[in-house]
Every structure is written in structure tokens, then in C-alpha cells.
Image (cartoon, rainbow, N blue to C red):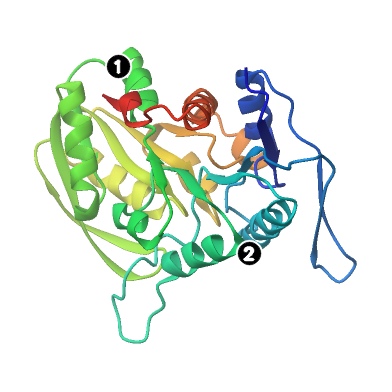
Amino acid sequence: MLERIKIFSGNSNLELAKKICKKLGVPLSDAQVSTFSDGETRVEIDENVRGMDVFIIQSTCSPVNVSIMELLIMIDALKRASADRITAVIPYYGYARQDRKVVPRAPITAKLVADLLTQAGANRILSVDLHAGQIQGFFNIPVDNLFATPLLLQYIKGHIKDNLVIVSPDTGGVVRARAFARRLGASLAIVDKRRDAPNESQVMNIIGSVKDKNVVILDDMIDTAGTMVQAANALKNEGAIEVYACCTHPVLSGPAIERIESSEIKEVIITDTIPLSDKAKSCTRIKTLSIATLLSETIKRIYYNESVSSLFI
């Protein structure tokens, strides 16, 4: 039934692309994505895509700049090969944390990447849990921002049932945490923190009661895990029984794994929007849930021009 669909993938998350193709029952289309000897990205599309509905699966994760260039060049190649519609499936949208000017002379990289994708020839964007909702407005093409919430909720309901509190690690994530808590019938707490420099934070206070509770810290991503670990320590000091961490995007850069392994966090629940390093795969505290079913169903609905929002009702 999906005779006009083509699924391509760059090198950033090939395993997820294969899972999506398996769910859809279509083969992963042939493309060579490599580099020239000087480091330039080299792309060759080895299939006819004229008049096809094309989806490129590529998280813009580490190495971030290489991943972005692979995606841009693939879009350009497919556009010049007369693909009918090109959808960039970006499970993790990189450069999203710089989404506004917080200090003078700062860039807005989320908008810059949006412009690059549009100018390259993307007709539609499909992403998961954008760091900020307003990023959708940076595009002049349709953007579907999916939520990993149903996947994470299902796991938490099945494994953490009693005396549950959902914690936002900062004030910016309160809306997300409140919606999560409402779906679980749990209470809400907030970590008040002060960030002195990028990737550095200092926990200041816990707003809400966590004493004798099982706590789930909810965020959209975990980068160096500094915020999560400090929040977990503060929550334990306030009397929490068990502390779990939950996020969509496991960036897990720098000392993240070492921090998690030596922290008060019992389990870190993540999705596979970003592939794990070998070190992260060996960490017994990390539980990975696959986003492949959600993405494959969304791709199918886009192909058939059906509702995507009804997935989350």
C-alpha cells in the first residue's frame, strides 16, 4: 500500500531508521552517505525517487555539525532528483537550546537551522519533543512536533505506582511536568535552580513536598546530567524514597554516564531518538524505550494525509 514512499537515513541514527522501516514493512532505500578525504560530506542516492514521497530519518545529534550537513545535502540531492515531497524526520532537533536572545549579541541557532532546512528543499518537518514549542514558528513549512509522553507514561504506570511525584528540574519545564502529573494522577514539585554557565547549574530549593514519595524528574533531554544529579541529591535530602529520571533525548555528553552511575538516581528512562554510546549501553541504570512505533505510524498518516494530532488525544 505504500508504493510511493521512500525512506532514507543518514548515519546519525541508522538503527532507528531500520526499526521504522520494519514497522512500515518497507525496505530502507539505498543511499551512500560518506566523506571525501578532506572531510566533506559525500551523498549518492542510488534509487529513483522521481515523484516519490520521501522521508529522511536523521537526528542532528553528535557529531552535530556532520549530522546537519548530511541531512542538508541529502535533502538537496533528493530535491534535484525530482522527489515529489521531502519530509525531514528529525527525532532530535539539535541547536534547539538557543531559541531566543537571552544576552546581547547572541545567535538564535534554532531559527538558523530551520532556515537551512527550508532553503535546502525540505517540504515538511517531523520531530519529537522540540526543546521549545515556538521553534515550530521558525519554519514556513508544516511542522509536526510529536510527544514521547504516551510511551513514557505507559512505562511509569507499569513500574512506579505508589506515592508518585513528578518533578520539573527547572521552571521552564513546569508545563510539561504538570501535564505529565495530571495524566498520572500524581502531585507536582519544582526544582528552583540557578545556572551560572552553560552545562552548569546549582540547585537552590525544592518547591513542593517529596518526603516519603517516589519521585520522577521529567525533562526533554539529559545532556551532561549535572542538573538531574543535583536535583536527585536535593530530592533525597528532602526525604524522597526513590528517585527516577525520565527524558526523551539522551544526549549524555561529557561526564554524564559517570554522574548517573554515582548518583542517587535509581533508573533513567529514555527513548532512542539519539543512539547510545557503548559506555551508555553498558550502564545498567538506563532503560531505553523505542520511539519507532510512534514515528512509523506518523509517517504512514502523513503519507495518507490523515490526522497526526489524533495520536495524542
The N terminus: image quadrant: top right
Residue 220, numbered circle: none
Q: Looking at the image, is 203 positioned above or below residue 119?
A: above
Q: Looking at the image, is 108 positioned above or below residue 78?
A: below
Is disc 2 surrounded by few (<14), some (14 to 19) or many (20+) residues within 10 Å? few
Q: Amino acid at mark 2?
A: Asn
| Residue 194 % position (x, y) | 24, 65
Q: Is residue 313 left or right of residue 26?
A: left
The image quadrant that residue 184 belongs to is top left
The answer to whether one can see residue 86 in this image is yes
The answer to whether one can see residue 211 in this image is no
Q: Is residue 117 left or right of residue 26?
A: left
Is disc 1 surrounded by few (<14), some (14 to 19) or many (20+) residues within 10 Å? few
Residue underneath mark 1 = 157
Q: Amino acid at mark 1?
A: Lys
Helix, strand or loop at disc 2?
Answer: helix
| Residue 8 % position (x, y) | 70, 40
Residue at the (61%, 46%) spot, across then down: 58
Residue at the (65%, 58%) spot, across then down: 63
